[in-house]
Image: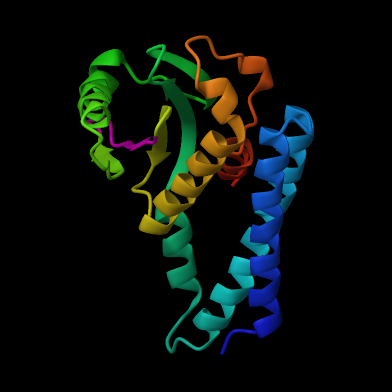
Amino acid sequence: MADKSIKAFHQEVQGKIKRLLTEFGEGKISSEQFNILYARYSNQLDMARSVLEGEEERTTPGSNISTIAIRAATTGKALGLAIYHHRSGMIIETLGTFDLSADIISPTLNEFSDKLDKREFIEPKTKKLTNGLWVVFMARRFTTAIVIFRNEPAPRQVKELERLQHAFEEANHHNLDKMDVDKSKLAKPFLNFVRRKLSS
């Protein structure tokens, strides 16, 4: 059974992230402070998750080094990310290497815009490209996040991205609820996710 203290720590860090989003939204901290603290808390969440998953793997019979190597070689790796702002119709942020052409992203952005206009729920969309890369689209009220992966992303990675996009919109909603977004004042929860994946 997973250690209760690790689960409690995981919940505590989630509480800190929630408070951080509120503080940034209320203007109590700068975007630089937000990005540093969010990266710290995200790393703590990852460590707690690793411990919990490590316990599960130790109880799984037949696990060996070749399985670990296969997992490492085929795990989805984020290469780049872009944030599309619905109201202005502009990409307001890019991280990593993002070089998708308009003909790849426009059909999905148009589809999501139609659904947003109709106030329909939008599931994340994962597509394999002809060059072997994968792209994930996720829409929320103000933005659509577009993430390029090498190898197919696991459902848990998509869930993590959904959490980060939620955090991005919660922290920046006053800035995003305009036609002209002040990019210099954006909190960037995605920053650590992309940096981590690029360095792994």
Residue 140, position in %: x, y? 39, 36
Residue 21, position in %: x, y? 65, 42
46 sits to left or right of 80: right
In the rendered image, residue 95 lying in the magenta stretch gets the answer no
Task: Name the residue nearer the viewer: 195 or 5.
Answer: 5
The answer to which image quadrant residue 198 occupies is top right
**Residue 11 appears in view:** yes
The answer to which image quadrant residue 46 occupies is bottom right
Residue at 52% x, 22% y: name it. 176
Residue 62, position in %: x, y? 42, 86
The answer to which image quadrant residue 89 occupies is top left
Q: Quadrant of the N terminus?
A: bottom right
**Residue 194 appears in view:** no
Task: Name the residue nearer the viewer: 41 or 57.
Answer: 41
Residue 57, position in %: x, y? 51, 80
Describe the colour scheme in one phrase. rainbow
Measured along the vertical axis of the image, is residue 179 above or below residue 152?
Answer: above
Q: Which residues are magenta?
A: 129-140
Measured along the vertical axis of the image, is residue 67 above or below residue 19?
Answer: below
Residue at 71% x, 34% y: name it. 26
In the rendered image, residue 134 lying in the magenta stretch gets the answer yes
Measured along the vertical axis of the image, is residue 164 above or below residue 130?
Answer: below
Residue at 27% x, 45% y: name it. 123
Residue at 48% x, 30% y: name it. 80
Q: How many marks?
A: 0
